[in-house]
Amino acid sequence: MTQGPIRVEIVAPVHNRKALTLLCLQSLSRINRTGLDVGIVIVDDGSTDGTSDAIREQFPGVDIVTGDGNLWFTEGTNAGVRRALERDTKYILLMNDDQVFDEDFLVTLVETAEKHPRSVIGSLLLQWDTPHKIFQMSPVWSTWHGGWRHWQSQTVWTVPEKPWKVDLIVGNCVLVPTEAMRECGLMNSTRYPNFGDAEYTPRLRKAGWNLIIDPRSRVFCQPNTPPGRIRSMGFKKLFNALFIDLKSLQSLRRRFYAYIDTAPTKLQGIAAFFIFLARAATGYNAETDRWGKAQAEEPLSKTFASAVVND
């Protein structure tokens, strides 16, 4: 019996970024779909810029789920996943709308997932303005550095040539088997209304799913907009951003949750949180301060040499 195409549903939440969303969908319309049956679910969370109308006009095959503006990233993604799970799909691709794709990125992800059972596969993320530089991927846990250490100077030439196992995959572009979602549930939108991917893939890993990056699957991402400087905020706004609003980029409460939920142990998570606070206060923050950006990094091909998986 000839096996039919493998069903993949692509899910992305969007809000008031019509031009970026349409660029992303245009890029997806040109990808290689050999052996795949691909559906796309866009969750438009209350856009007021005509995003949904433009999608219906230019990409009538896209399924649109409408939100009221209060879903944010995590519950927006969950809403799309729930729609996708109504169909007989084997994989769901979770992604952002501010990116474009190499022609073979999806067939490569599915091919790797088929070779490695109980695996979640992430693409090689690259910055679209400097397309040789990798983008917020393959971080490693370091209590001494104050949590997850993201790389500053890695490129397409310093990563392993073959897929490798990691401890966390950010949600920009990650292929998740529906079996994993049915087994482990969806993202936690209560603790993480805006950054649920930070906790999700470590939870899958702890449940016995492999996390793998495939460097042959390339996705080009818009660089992140730097958060506002907290020194320029008034007291009330600062207090809300740091301690109340879990959607805030600066939320210390969300960061604390992420540390205890994703660290190797809760004790390491608590220790790393307070080390992060001390480093941030003294200018030795490994994430954003000049000190962190100046730290030497060995090539990821060396760091992850023992984590490369066999085809």
Image (cartoon, rainbow, N blue to C red):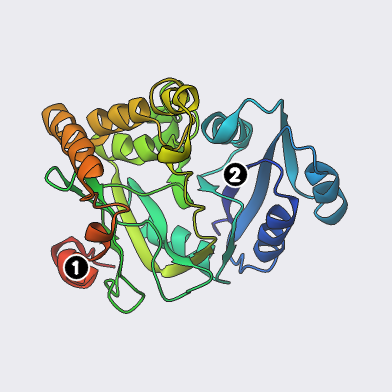
Please name the amino acid that badge 2 sits on.
Answer: Val
The quarter of the displayed image where residue 244 is located: top left
Residue 11 has which mark? 2
Residue 189 has which mark? none
Q: Please tell me whether mark 1 sits on a helix, a strand or a loop.
A: loop
Judge left or right: residue 180 versus residue 162: right
Estimate how packed mark 2 is, as few (under 14), some (14 to 19) or many (20 or more) residues with alpha carbons within 10 Å: many
Count of numbered circles in the view: 2
Estimate how packed mark 1 is, as few (under 14), some (14 to 19) or many (20 or more) residues with alpha carbons within 10 Å: few
Task: Name the foreground residue: 180 vs 12.
Answer: 12
- Measuring 39% from the left and 37% from the top, which residue is drawn there? 180
Judge left or right: residue 27 versus residue 143: right
Task: Name the foreground residue: 148 vs 89.
Answer: 148
- Measuring 17% from the left and 68% from the top, which residue is drawn there? 296
Judge left or right: residue 263 versus residue 3: left
Please say if the residues under marks 1 and 2 sit with CB atoms less than 8 Å apart: no
Q: Please tell me whether mark 2 sits on a helix, a strand or a loop.
A: strand
Residue 297 has which mark? 1
Gap between marks 1 and 2 measured at Cα: 34 Å
Q: Nearer the viewer, mark 1 or mark 2?
A: 1
Q: Is residue 270 visible?
A: yes
Q: Is residue 85 visible?
A: no
Please name the amino acid that badge 1 sits on.
Answer: Glu
Residue 41 rendering spot, x and y as whole percentages: 67, 43
The quarter of the displayed image where residue 79 is located: top right
N-terminal-most mark, 1 or 2: 2
- Quadrant, the C terminus: bottom left
- Measuring 58% from the left and 32% from the top, which residue is drawn there? 72
